Amino acid sequence: MINFIIESTISLIIFFSFYKLFLEGEKTYQFNRFYLLTSILVSFVIPFISIEIVKEIQNIPFPPKITFETTNKNSIALGPKTDYIFVFTLFIYSIITILLLIRFIKNLWHFKTKIISNETIQFKNSKLILVEENTIPYTFLNYIFLNKEAYKKGSINPEFYEHELTHVNQKHTYDILFVELVKIIFWFNPIFIMYKKAIQLNHEFIADENVIKKHHDVSFYQSLLLNTIETKKYYLASNLNYLVTKKRLIMMTKNTSKFPSFIKRVGIIPLFTFMIYFLCTDIVAQEKKKSDSTFPNKELDNYYEDTRIVFKDKKNKVIADKKYTELSEQEKLQVPPPPIPRKIKISEIQFEDFKNQSKYAIWIDGKNVQNLELNKYKASDFVLFQNSHVYKNARSEKFPQENQANLYTEEGYKAVFNTKNKRLGGTIVIRIPEPPKKQ
């Protein structure tokens, strides 16, 4: 989840920066609308795209000094540890998200109440809602809200009707609703606030352009806007007077050159390619295989067939994590041969200590058992025991003990070691020390 948030945020910042630098000042409003909405969706998809680039490298022999940590795939089921920081964070996130969702629903209900409780008049492909409040026209879905007194007196300029009809015809409300829903889910990310402002301002550019095309009087329309400035904001509505800034007034008279505008739009292609390369590609090192290579030992292939081999460096960074059958010839040389240990009797003291479940995870003849299962046995029933320490970074919720003990009866010893059958899965961790520094 953290990777998704980081990568999607990086994508959004890059997309939005490109828009502010190259597209916002161009009179390509419909393209800009498509770009802003699509870039949000693309930013959610990018974290799920993964492209692997295989790079072949020469076989590099590992240094001879290697340490081994062996873990079994079986584990004792104990109660999981509670991550209180995660629980608290999730609680806070849920509370804020629920409050924002309630606010969103409340505003939808507010519009519904206005529509039901006020006079409605059919107007072209929209409906005029005559309200008592002293307000300039604003739009929600296909409803245009007007001051009732101003409408009855006929004092609302036709430019204002045309402006709001543009919002209705082009369904701008759906853009705002979409961004608001995204903001509810990702309320902690301020980039969506900037996106909403940019989308709403672009809506006004579109509506302004349509008014000017129909009425052909830029100066008069600008004076109308400047004389109807209102500070009240409408949370989910398209507002006639949203952000009447110098930028908006300039855009009404600005001319856009076709070729530079085309180049800027085409610039999205290298931008997207750049983001895919740096956010979605993983370079995978693969050793070059020799044509005459043969595996060193077929017995090892059979014995370790179900075992994973993890190579780590001194800093515990994973160099490779593969099944034994996927290893190269050079890597297989680093894996120890199948163990055939000599028999070791368990002392009575050690046998009693193995019953401590908080300290030991126990396997009998390769099968994981509860520590209390040892009460059915005597120390003399076992001909071999292997006790290994588990490092902290190798423990998990299922494997919290600091020791793992494998106990073998005579029958189990013969089955596992004398017949050299398959190892019972699990993982072998091979630590590779740093090569000596050159003098």
Image (cartoon, rainbow, N blue to C red):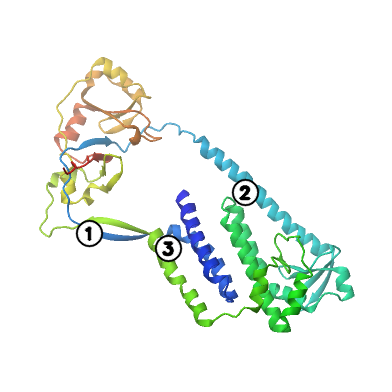
> How far across and down, in percent of the image, does residue 254 sit?
62, 78
Q: Amino acid at mark 2?
A: Thr
Question: Which secondary structure, mark 3?
Answer: helix
Describe residue 138's horizontal placement relative to residue 24 as left or right: right
Residue behind mark 3: 275
The span from disc 3 to disc 1 (Cα, nearest Å) is 24 Å
Q: Examine the rendering and report whether any part of residue 149 can be seen.
A: yes
Q: Identify the residue shown where x is 35% and y is 24%.
A: 359
Residue behind mark 1: 56
Quadrant housing residue 412: top left
The span from disc 2 to disc 3 (Cα, nearest Å) is 30 Å
Label at residue 298: none
Q: Is residue 89 above or below residue 251?
A: above
Question: Which secondary structure, mark 2?
Answer: helix
Describe residue 261's horizontal placement relative to residue 414 as left or right: right
Q: Identify the residue shown where x is 41% and y is 60%.
A: 49
Callout 1 environment at 10 Å: few (<14), some (14 to 19), or many (20+)? few
Q: Is residue 18 above or below residue 110?
A: below
